[in-house]
Every structure is written in structure tokens, then in C-alpha cells.
Image (cartoon, helix red, strand yellow):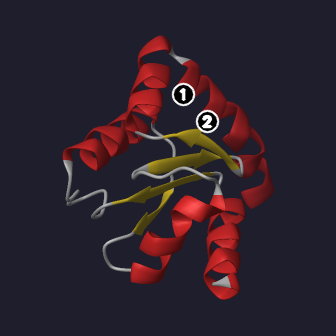
Amino acid sequence: MADVLERIDEQVKGNKVMIYMKGTPQFPQCGFSGRTVEALKQVGKEFGYCNVLADPEIFQNLPRYADWPTFPQVYVDGELIGGCDITLEMFENGDLKKMIDEATAGQAANDQ
């Protein structure tokens, strides 16, 4: 279990925005994942993703990582922001874009 938690930690810290979802951004496998990924796409920044259906170890252990029992899970700048409902609420009130813009602000400068 320690190995998979380390792998999750590397993914969360290695991506400014990370979603653990059922399916992929192109082919979500549940409505909650689909709605959440659409909100992330609307923000217009790149994000990492993990299809938990294709990785049973992550599917079983991710709820232990941040003590959040359901999918999808969205992380911004290494912190869990929540699942579908919270992400959509933040998108609708503008907080999601602001948070992601702040998290990725230094990224373009660092990439050059």
C-alpha cells in the first residue's frame, strides 16, 4: 500500500491540477466525472488525470490518501479541493478559475 500512496503523492505534487476520475477526459465513464472534467476544461489550463477504473490499486487506495471516499477527486497545487459538487460550485462562482490561475501562474515562466 505504501507504494501506491507514494505514486498518488507524486501525481498530486507533480501536476498543478490533477483529477482522479472514472474514465478519461475524452471518455468519462460516469456523469460526475464528466461534469467535473468539463468544468476543468472550461478553465482552459492543462491538467493531469488518472483513470481509476484502469488502475485498481489507485481506485482502492486513493480514498485513504486524503480521506475522501468518492470519485472524482480534484487536486489543485497539491491540495484536495473536493469532488464534483464542490468543483462545480467553485466553477460557477469563479473560484475554480482563480485558484487554478494562481496555481499555474509560475508554470509558464518556469517552462521557458
Residue 74, position as x, y percentages in the image: 52, 47
Q: Please count the marks in the image.
A: 2
* Residue at 20%, 59% in the rendered image: 29
Q: Secondary structure at mark 2?
A: helix
Up the image or down, 43 lies above or below 52; here it is above
* Residue at 54%, 27% in the rendered image: 96
* Residue at 46%, 32% in the rendered image: 87
Q: Which residue occupies the foreground of this view, 105 or 83?
A: 83
Disc 1 marks which amino acid?
Leu
| Cβ atoms at labels 2 and 1 below 8 Å apart | yes
Up the image or down, 100 lies above or below 62; here it is above
Up the image or down, 3 lies above or below 64; here it is below
Q: Which residue occupies the foreground of this view, 44 or 17?
A: 17
Within 10 angstroms of label 1, few (less than 14), some, or many (20 or more) residues? many
**Badge number at residue 14:** none
Residue 50, can we see it?
yes
Residue 42, position as x, y percentages in the image: 38, 33
* Residue at 40%, 50% in the rendered image: 72
Query: Badge 2 is on which residue?
Result: 100
Q: Is residue 96 left or right of residue 76?
A: left
Q: Is residue 6 left or right of residue 34?
A: right
Quarter of the image with the N terminus in it: bottom right
Q: Which residue occupies the foreground of this view, 107 or 6?
A: 6
Q: Is residue 80 left or right of residue 28?
A: right
Q: Which residue occupies the foreground of this view, 77 or 9?
A: 9
Residue 15, position as x, y percentages in the image: 63, 59
Q: Secondary structure at mark 1?
A: helix
Residue 112, can we see it?
no
Query: Badge 1 is on which residue?
Result: 96
Quadrant of the rendered image containing residue 18: bottom right
